[in-house]
Image (cartoon, grey):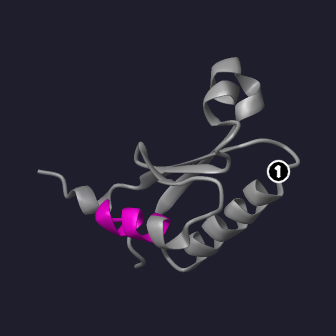
Amino acid sequence: MQNAGNDIKRVVLYHRPGCHLCEEAIAALVALHGEGYRFQLHEIDIESDDLLLRRHLEKIPVVEVDGIVASELRFDATGVRSRLDTVGAWPT
């Protein structure tokens, strides 16, 4: 049986160009990665799809960790860290 703790977790950031809160979220996620949290960051521009734009426009930046929303609007470092810890992406 494979140890789930060894899997690289997926973090998705829904953002749009020119959003200063989104830029802050990207910087914070890069900093978490620098602390040793293990995850792959996928950035999705909500302007690339009408449904994403309608769904997330009033909430960006939205951060999902393994499919679960961990942060909306202002980057919630505590919420994202907690979710990363829950899924086993803690620092090495």
Q: How many marks?
A: 1
Q: Is residue 6 left or right of residue 73?
A: left
What's the magenta region? Answer: 80-89
In the rendered view, tell whether residue 52 sits above or below residue 27.
above
Dot 1 amino acid type: Cys
Q: Is residue 7 left or right of residue 69?
A: left
Relative depth, front residue between 78 and 12: 78
User: Which quarter of the figure has residue 67?
Assistant: top left
- Helix, strand or loop at disc 1? loop
Q: Is residue 49 left or right of residue 38?
A: right
User: Is the stretch drawn in magenta largely helix, strand or loop?
Assistant: helix
Q: Residue furthest left?
A: 1
Q: Residue furthest top?
A: 50
* Image location (x, y in percent) of residue 69: 46, 48
Q: Is residue 81 left or right of residue 74?
A: left
Q: Which residue is mark 1?
A: 19
* Image location (x, y in percent) of residue 81: 45, 70
* Image location (x, y in percent) of residue 58: 69, 40
Q: Residue at x 61, y 29 (%)?
A: 55
Residue neighbourhood size for the residue with mark 1, other residues' Cα within 10 Å, grouped as few (<14), some (14–19), many (≥20): few
Q: Residue at x 46, y 66 (%)?
A: 79
In the rendered view, tell whether residue 13 sits above or below residue 33.
above
* Image location (x, y in percent) of residue 86: 30, 64
Q: Quadrant of the image for the C terminus? A: bottom left
Q: Residue at x 39, y 69 (%)?
A: 82
50 is within the stretch colored magenta: no
